[in-house]
């Protein structure tokens, strides 16, 4: 500013030296221009030919040209009635280069400089350079890099241009060494520190960034602290001040938070007011707050959302629910009144679908629960979006409800989908500790001709099992949404290679059935299967197996009815974060078949999200089979097995349970399995959607309930670490497991993996 004042004074005095009195300007000439057009200068000058020009006008003209930022020097001269403007242009910035910046990208740095008046193609003002250096340092300070150093180099270039280079030595980020609280009485420092994402890193967390300081992280943690107190009744809680102190070496940070807890309040009376639409008793069931409980702002927010969602089910999509607190300081209570304003009921004028280049409109509309002409239901919209997402045809589904112009009670529903490739051709080779070498080939189309129908051919082979299968699923065979399916398969099993027993089995199976939706989450399956089975007993076949063949022959034909019920509330199929999946299955050979038996299974999986990418999964299943009618027992080749990477890790595949006289596992007609898994992303790779690490505890066992007592003490347990990856070659699973209660005769296996799987 001082330099500019000197320049203005000098230029003004120079003009005075050549102009003793005011005059009428007849012509204006500009000298010294290199890049800037003469018209630009004339446009900024507050004087034009024909104007009177005096001492005060000269100062205004000089200042106006300086204000453009284009010039380093401006002077005015008078030549008769001619005004001469002499300028020295500032150089133009030809390029800006950065060196040493890892934490902040070039584009972000350029954006910051441009906002301060330094950008490529702009005029270069050397006086701003020091300010820019300090500003960049402040950006790094906000990220915790207090030891940063910024230096600049300006290199002249031809045609009055310059190159600007900024050298940055970022240094190391300062680490949070200590966080202390002043004024906290209800909760100790350790409890409050646990609410912070930032803080001293534990000694064992070698790759943790918990102690990395930034202003943004501190601000977020302070908001979390406010929510912590206000959800526990401290409605007047305040953070009085925050001090951030850095050590002289700029490597460690001490944070002190001064707070005022205030008094703790309970909920007094809870009332509903306004136009409730529903019966008050029905709405009260949605209240997350109750009289006598500790006041919680989060519970109030949940109540508001629940009431709005309920009103949205009846078409009041834009309802307002306002909680009004009435604080009784003496009683230490907060009386709450939720005022309900449903606003207008909203109807759907039209449903528009976009983005579906292959999938037919009627396939998408068949999944929509929301109807045209009906009132808008937020519940049906969510269900429609979920059903479309679970089809597997789309990588993204969005549903918007713009208002109809000029109509306050109408909206359109706009469904926009992004289609994914629905066909696949797969050929690969894998290996599993249980299966050996796995060969697979498959071709499938999940959205045949845009109809939603699915056709698949698969061929899989490993050391003991070969399978060929052709299947077709006709989606929405009826207007009520019933699916119809057909399949034909061939299977060849060598049980000796699986370390089970000394026999071979060949089966040809044809199936026909239906999948019947009974609700948004529940499906019933009904199939009929014709199974032609041929057995080949080897030299070491057991007495039980030979007795079975003696009674039933080597070849049997079975007509089997399969019934299933499935309830699926998962948010997605791959690595679910919430919800559950339950399935009950019953397989019964129809009376009159060569073999009369049944098998029943119940499976359940539940998922609970701890963070966006971390989930706890609970899995369990119980299976039982037996003969009926003329049958004596469950056919031995229909037995259940346990042990291995898919059931109880840490034990060899199919090794648990009863054994025959050759010490080979025979399986059993009763099986129990359980698993608890904590799934989380790889450290530093939280964006990976197809890969998870897992810590787990497995449990399971197989019994022959016909010949042995069933006791829970027979269950085998294991624990370990696993990896699950949905790779382009198929699912890859690995585990390192340690049996927790293995017996001397158990066959254990610490490391197990499988790449590729049967369809």
Image (cartoon, rainbow, N blue to C red):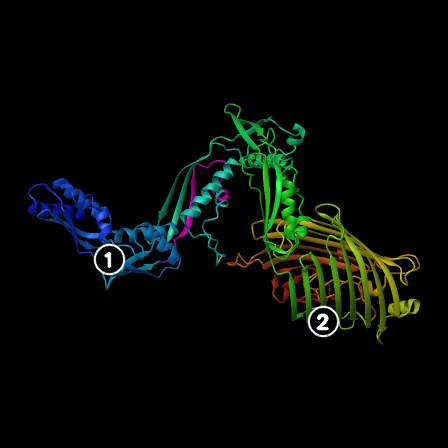
Question: Which type of secondary structure does the marked residue at label 1 adopt?
Answer: loop
Q: Is residue 408 shown above or below 207?
A: above
Residue 96 placement, left or right of 648: left
Whether residue 175 appears in magenta in the rendering, the answer is: yes
> Where does label 1 land, which residue?
35
Residue 638 in picture, x, y percent from top left:
82, 63
Q: Residues within 10 Å of mark 1 (few under 14, many from 20)?
A: few
Q: Which residues are magenta?
A: 171-191
Residue 343, disc:
none
Residue displayed at 78% across by 66% down: 489
> Where does label 2 land, which residue?
462
Residue displayed at 88% across by 61% down: 633
Q: Is residue 408 shown above or below 19?
A: above
Residue 524 placement, left or right of 578: right
Residue occupying the far bottom of the picture = 539
Whether residue 558 appears in magenta in the rendering, the answer is: no
> Toward the viewer: 103 or 636?
103
Question: Which quarter shows the C terminus?
Answer: bottom right
Q: Quadrant of residue 702?
A: bottom right
Q: Earlier in the sequence, mark 2 or mark 1?
A: 1
Q: Quadrant of residue 296?
A: top right
Residue 501 placement, left or right of 110: right
> Toward the viewer: 158 or 151?
158
């Amino acid at each position: 500013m001082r330099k500019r004042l000197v320049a203005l004074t000098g230029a003004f005095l120079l003009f005075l030296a050549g102009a003793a009195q005011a005059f009428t300007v007849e012509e204006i000439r500009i000298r010294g221009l290199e890049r800037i057009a003469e018209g630009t200068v004339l446009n900024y000058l507050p004087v034009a030919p024909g104007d009177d020009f005096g001492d005060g006008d000269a100062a205004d003209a000089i200042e106006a040209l300086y204000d453009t930022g284009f010039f380093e020097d401006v002077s005015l001269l008078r030549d008769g009635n001619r005004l001469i403007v002499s300028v020295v242009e500032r150089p133009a910035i030809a390029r800006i280069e950065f060196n040493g910046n890892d934490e902040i990208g070039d584009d972000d740095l350029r954006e910051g400089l441009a906002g301060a008046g330094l950008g490529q193609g702009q005029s270069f003002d050397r006086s701003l350079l020091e300010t820019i250096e300090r500003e960049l340092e402040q950006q790094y300070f906000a990220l915790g890099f207090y030891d940063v150093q910024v230096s600049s180099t300006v290199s002249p270039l031809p045609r009055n241009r310059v190159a600007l280079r900024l050298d940055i030595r970022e240094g190391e980020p300062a680490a949070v060494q200590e966080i202390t609280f002043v004024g906290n009485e209800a909760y100790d420092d350790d409890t409050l520190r646990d609410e912070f994402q930032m803080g001293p890193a534990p000694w064992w967390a070698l790759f943790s960034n918990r102690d990395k300081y930034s202003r943004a992280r501190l601000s977020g943690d302070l908001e979390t602290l406010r929510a912590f107190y206000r959800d526990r009744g401290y409605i007047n809680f305040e953070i009085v001040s925050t001090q951030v102190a850095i050590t002289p070496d700029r490597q460690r940070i001490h944070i002190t938070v001064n707070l005022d807890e205030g008094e703790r309040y309970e909920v007094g009376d809870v009332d509903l007011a306004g136009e409730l639409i529903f019966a008050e008793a029905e709405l009260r069931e949605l209240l997350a707050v109750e009289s006598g409980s500790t006041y919680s702002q989060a519970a109030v927010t949940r109540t508001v959302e629940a009431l709005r969602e309920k009103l949205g089910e009846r078409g009041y999509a834009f309802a307002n629910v306002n909680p009004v607190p009435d604080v009784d300081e003496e009683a230490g209570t907060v009386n709450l009144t939720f005022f309900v304003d449903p606003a207008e009921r909203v109807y759907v004028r039209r449903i528009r679908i976009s983005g579906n280049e292959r999938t037919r409109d009627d396939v998408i509309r068949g999944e929509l629960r929301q109807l045209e002409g009906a009132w808008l239901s937020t519940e049906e919209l969510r269900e429609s979006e979920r059903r479309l997402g679970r089809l597997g045809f789309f990588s993204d589904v969005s549903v918007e409800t713009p208002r109809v112009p000029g109509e306050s009670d109408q909206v359109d529903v706009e469904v926009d989908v992004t289609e994914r490739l629905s066909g696949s051709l797969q050929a690969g080779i894998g290996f599993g500790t249980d299966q050996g070498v796995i060969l697979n080939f498959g071709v499938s189309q999940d959205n045949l001709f845009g109809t939603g129908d699915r056709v698949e051919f698969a061929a899989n082979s490993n050391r003991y099992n070969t399978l060929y299968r052709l299947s077709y699923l006709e989606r929405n065979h009826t207007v009520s949404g019933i699916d119809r399916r057909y399949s034909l398969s061939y299977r060849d099993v060598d049980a000796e290679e699986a370390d089970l027993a000394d026999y071979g089995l060949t089966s040809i199976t044809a199936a026909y059935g239906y999948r019947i939706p009974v609700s948004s989450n529940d499906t019933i399956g009904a199939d009929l299967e014709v199974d032609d089975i041929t057995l080949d007993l080897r030299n070491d076949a057991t007495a039980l197996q030979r007795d079975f063949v003696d009674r039933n022959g080597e070849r049997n034909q079975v007509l089997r009815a399969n019934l299933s019920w499935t309830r699926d509330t998962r948010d997605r199929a791959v690595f679910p974060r919430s919800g559950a999946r339950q399935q009950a299955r019953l397989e019964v050979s129809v009376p009159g078949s060569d073999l009369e038996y049944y098998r029943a299974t119940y499976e359940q999986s539940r998922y609970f999200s701890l963070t966006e990418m971390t989930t706890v999964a609970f899995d369990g299943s119980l299976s039982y089979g037996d003969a009926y009618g003329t049958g004596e027992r469950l056919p031995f080749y229909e037995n259940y097995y346990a042990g291995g990477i898919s059931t109880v890790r840490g034990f060899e595949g199919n090794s648990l349970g009863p054994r025959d006289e050759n010490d080979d596992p025979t399986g059993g007609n009763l099986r129990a399995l359980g698993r608890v898994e904590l799934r989380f992303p790889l450290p530093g790779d939280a964006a990976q959607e197809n890969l998870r690490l897992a810590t787990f505890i497995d449990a399971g066992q197989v019994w022959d309930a016909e010949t042995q007592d069933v006791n829970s003490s027979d269950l085998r347990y294991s624990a370990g670490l696993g990896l699950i990856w949905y790779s382009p070659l198929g699912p890859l699973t690995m585990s390192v497991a340690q049996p927790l209660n293995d017996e001397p005769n158990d066959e254990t296996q610490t490391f197990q993996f499988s790449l590729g799987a049967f369809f």
